[in-house]
Image (cartoon, grey):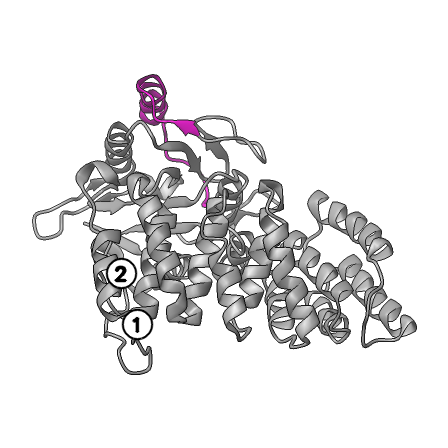
């Protein structure tokens, strides 16, 4: 695992936490607890993901409040999907009633917006915990002030398939209907996950649940629908090419590498033309169509990352005002195609903006990086990018929509790219669209 300034900062944070975690009723002796913490500290210092996972299991064996506190903080801070999954599973497998009650109380008490990552880790970890109290605690976060927590709670309730969560989900859907965003999609999907049904709005869901809720048995009465429909009015969705995207906080991530200079033939009389010009035209159309309540930014990437508005970690998105849209259109018009395809850097930059909950990625080339000798490009393993994105997205549940050119379909040369783009979308709640 490569080191970075953020990684070094995490090691420093970890040392402080390992010293400060308070003792509590626990299964491990003082000596064994110290050894477990030390093993994790060594694993982090070495960047050894497998060793960190093993150390997480040793810490979890304590099954105590102090273990919960430490594991939750690791899940919040450490950007490693294997370690996060180990933390989630370890917390989820704890069955000591006092420890489970402690997690539920933390989920309820830690309600400040700045503690949202703690709540998200706990929600993810409680999915497989049995009990009505757990369902109630997770449902209690459907009115959270942070949309990411609402999405996490909705997804968790959908996985639990506990009918007792349905009234709270319907209430959440009603609150979100005036400003449809990805959280609205997640709540709607949770209702479908539990019931196997799909209704257009909260009012229809209330009528349905009033009729069946008292006797509903998910093992007998569940319908056969798996995916909730997201049909909305024209003014409730952004549009890129022919795809409607329900989102209020969007990052467009556009490939402007050298291959975008290529010109494609029409397919069945549709599309075709120089890729870079087509994309500029469609991106401009998408920006013009953004409603005033949408916030956005644009990344154009090759081996160099360019942004319409500067991006810093924690920087905001920008509202789609007439002035901002005019400035973005001028910037889009000046885009040129040149260089390699640093898809990994572009996605990382997109996730640097905490407000982003929807990423629209268009690319025509397999991820590749200019080599150190500056003599050519080396391919980037798509699996590594997928893994990094899952880590960056582990608590945010941002949706990623990907776009490729249909002319690639059936061409063995482009199969790896299409698979990567399809996997990236599916693993992050979106879909891939092939452009004619």
Judge the density around disc 2: few (<14), some (14-19), many (≥20) Cα neighbours within 10 Å.
many
Q: Which residue is mark 2?
A: 228
Q: Residue at x 23, y 52 (%)?
A: 203
Q: Which corner quadrant of the image does residue 105 belong to?
A: bottom right
Please state which of residues 401 and 330 is positioned toward the viewer in this rendering: 401
Q: Is residue 340 above or below residue 385?
A: above
Q: Indicate the position of residue 118 as horizontal and vertical percent values.
A: 62, 53
Q: Indicate the position of residue 90 as horizontal and vertical percent values.
A: 65, 72
Judge the density around disc 1: few (<14), some (14-19), many (≥20) Cα neighbours within 10 Å.
few
Please state which of residues 65 and 98 is positioned toward the viewer in this rendering: 98
Q: Residue at x 24, y 71 (%)?
A: 212
Q: Is residue 258 left or right of residue 104?
A: left
Distance of label 1 from label 2 (alpha carbons): 23 Å
Quarter of the image for the N terminus: give it.
bottom right
**Residue 214, numbered label:** 1
Q: Is residue 311 above or below residue 117?
A: above
Q: Is residue 293 above or below residue 68?
A: above
Extent of the magenta region:
318-342
Q: Indicate the position of residue 42 as horizontal and vertical percent values.
A: 82, 63
Is residue 421 in view from this perspective? no
**Which mark is nearer the camera, 1 or 2?**
1
Q: Secondary structure at mark 2?
A: loop
Most extreme residue toward the right is 31
Q: Is residue 319 left or right of residue 61?
A: left
Q: Secondary structure at mark 1?
A: loop
């Amino acid at each position: 695992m490569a080191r970075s300034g953020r990684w070094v900062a995490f090691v420093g944070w970890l040392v402080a936490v390992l010293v400060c975690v308070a003792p509590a009723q626990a299964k491990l002796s003082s000596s064994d607890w110290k050894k477990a913490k030390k093993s994790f500290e060594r694993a982090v210092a070495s960047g050894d993901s497998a060793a960190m996972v093993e150390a997480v299991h040793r810490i979890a064996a304590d099954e105590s409040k102090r273990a919960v506190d430490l594991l939750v903080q690791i899940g919040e801070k450490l950007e490693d999907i294997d370690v996060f999954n180990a933390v989630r599973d370890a917390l989820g497998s704890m069955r000591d009633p006092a420890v489970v009650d402690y997690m539920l109380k933390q989920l309820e008490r830690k309600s400040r917006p700045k503690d949202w990552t703690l709540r998200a880790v706990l929600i993810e970890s409680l999915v497989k915990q049995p009990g009505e109290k757990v369902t109630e605690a997770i449902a209690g976060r459907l009115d959270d002030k942070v949309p990411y927590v609402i999405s996490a709670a909705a997804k968790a309730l959908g996985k639990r398939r506990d009918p007792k969560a349905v009234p709270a989900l319907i209430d959440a859907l009603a609150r979100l209907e005036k400003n449809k965003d990805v959280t609205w999609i997640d709540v709607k999907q949770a209702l479908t996950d539990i019931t196997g049904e799909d209704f257009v709005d909260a009012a229809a869901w209330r009528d349905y649940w009033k009729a069946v809720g008292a006797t509903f048995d998910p093992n007998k009465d569940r319908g056969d629908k798996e995916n909730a429909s997201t049909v909305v009015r024209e003014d409730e969705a952004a549009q890129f090419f022919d795809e409607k995207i329900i989102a209020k906080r969007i990052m467009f991530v556009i490939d402007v590498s050298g291959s975008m200079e290529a010109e494609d033939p029409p397919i069945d009389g549709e599309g075709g033309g120089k890729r870079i010009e087509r994309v500029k035209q469609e991106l401009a159309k998408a920006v013009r169509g953004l409603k005033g309540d949408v916030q956005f930014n644009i990344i154009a990437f090759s081996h160099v990352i360019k942004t319409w508005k500067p991006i810093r970690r924690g920087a905001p998105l920008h509202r789609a005002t007439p002035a901002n849209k005019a400035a973005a259109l001028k910037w889009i018009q000046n885009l040129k195609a040149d260089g390699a395809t640093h898809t990994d850097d572009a996605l990382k930059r997109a996730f640097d903006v905490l407000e982003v909950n929807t990423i629209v990625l268009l690319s025509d080339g397999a991820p590749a990086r200019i080599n150190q000798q500056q003599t050519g490009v080396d391919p980037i393993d798509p699996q590594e990018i997928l893994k990094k994105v899952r880590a960056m997205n582990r608590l945010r549940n941002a949706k990623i929509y990907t776009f490729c050119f249909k002319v690639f379909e059936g061409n063995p040369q482009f199969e790896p790219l299409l698979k990567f783009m399809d996997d990236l979308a599916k693993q992050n709640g979106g879909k891939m669209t092939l452009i004619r």
